[in-house]
Image: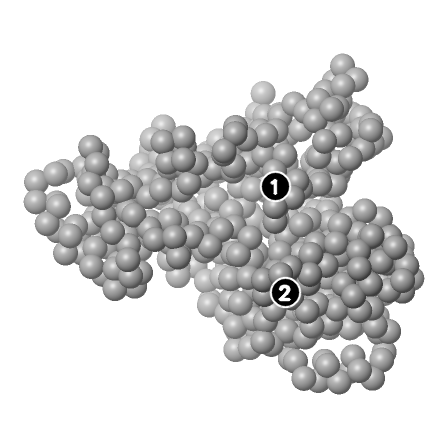
Amino acid sequence: MILSARRLTAMLRIGATALTLLNCTSKSEDHTVAQKPVHLVTVDPGHFHAALVQKSMYDDVDSVIHVYAPAGPDVEMHLARIDNFNKRAENPTRWNEVVYTGADFFDKMLTQKSGNVVVLAGNNEKKTEYIARAIGAGFNVLGDKPMAIDGKGFDLLKTAFTEAASKKLLLYDIMTERYEISTILQKELSQLPEVFGVLEAGTPENPSVTKESVHHFFKYVSGSILTRPPWFMDVKQEGEGIVDVTTHLVDLVQWECFPEQAIDYTHDIEIQKAKRTKTPMTLSQFKAITKLDAFPGYLQSMVKSDTVLEVYSNGEINYKIKNVHARVSVIWNYQAPEGAGDTHYSIMRGTKANLIIRQGKEEQFKPTLYIEPLKVDGYEAVLAGQFRKIQDKYAGVELKKNAKGWEVVIPEQYKEGHEAHFGRVMEKFLGYLKNGDMPAWEVPNMLAKYYTTTKALEVAVKEP
């Protein structure tokens, strides 16, 4: 069904001016589409990331966004987030959401073809199928991670990439962490041989590259407590932690260690060890983030002692990539300590120095980059000279000496925050779309990334 503005406003309890729901075949809409080359179609937006790609307006994107989803709280929360963007005092957006709800929402999206780019950020159980079907129908696809949560999904994703290439369509995933400034500078410094040397090969016990991420079920987004859909805790629908957040970490290993190099997963990736563990969540904690009074039926197999939900949200992968040993791990706690949030740890070990990102209490839970040299003699003068190359690109970045080496002091202007990074990804995608192409390494590296995570899941499930 197509929702009227009156009914949708009542349902969401938001102002009637928030959303302008237009008929899908109106003349005014046809005129708008003609003025803008990109028209987005949002499908089943169950994850808040679907809204964050619309936190800003874009020159090439039409303001009318078609939304196809089953009726229910997921789409309601999505539209409420868009409404908040439209109503904010500073730089409000001007999105007009045309909403279709019904059991046949995906088939309706395919037949109506109201745009040329499908945005997918929601329940992952059918996401890979949706990607393949959207590509088959001639849509470009911008998909949130993960685009595949198991081996079967990976095989389907491979087929989708092949078809996308044959139809000259873009299939791209949302890798926001490439835009975090401490990660960018870690990569930049690793490309200075005089400062970093070359990347160590490492060993399984002491990998050359380690990336660890700690996340929380209870968190704030855009200033409000995030309401999680109950299926977010169902690994059959969301995917286990080892195939979800680790997607970002595997991507960063490839992006930083082998910049602009294609990774062939059939030769360059070897999973050595993988493990998965559970995070417990009480019923009262579950209520706080879902607003539900009981665990849904599909979660009952994960409930212990009637009141504790156990979620396979934690995972670790030890693997070799192009003969470099790497380790990635993710942990999901229920809630962060006071003043803290999601945290990231990363180390790249070079023959001359280690580049380390820490985000602990000492850093006030803010990502901080350190340079820790292996040999001190003459290193400071070399670093000072080479660091000017970084300063030429990022004015205002400075070095601050400490007991182990140096802290890279980054001006606030570069610290955009996680939510702003979704706009960066969208801008990159739109640039690729406008040019009709993207770098040759992107597709093979997306395949390598999802092979790594889904193969690691297979290994972890077999572990005792």
Question: Residue sitting at 62 percent across and 25 percent down?
Answer: 278
Is 445 placed left or right of 368 in the picture?
right
Instruction: Tell me the amino acid under the disc marked 1.
Output: Tyr
Q: Where is residue 16 in the image (x, y as percent from the top left)?
A: 82, 63
Instruction: Bin the neighbour count of mark 2 within 10 Å (Cα to Cα): few under 14, some 14-19, many 20 and up.
Output: some
The residue pinned by badge 1 equals 220
The outermost residue toward the left is 378
Q: Mark 2 points at which residue?
A: 92
Q: Contact, CB < 8 Å: mark 2 with mark 1?
A: no
Q: Give how far across and how far down residue 163 sits, in percent.
A: 65, 67
Question: Helix, strand or loop at disc 1?
Answer: strand
In the image, 254 versus 390, the foreground residue is 390
**Residue at (90%, 59%) from the top-left corner?**
7
**Mark pair 2, 1: CA separation:** 20 Å
Q: In the rendered structure, which amino acid carries the disc numbered 2?
A: Pro
Picture quadrant of residue 457 = top right
Q: Is residue 58 shown above or below 265? A: below
> Of callouts 2 and 1, which one flags the residue occurring earlier in the amino acid sequence?
2
Q: Is residue 254 left or right of residue 386?
A: right
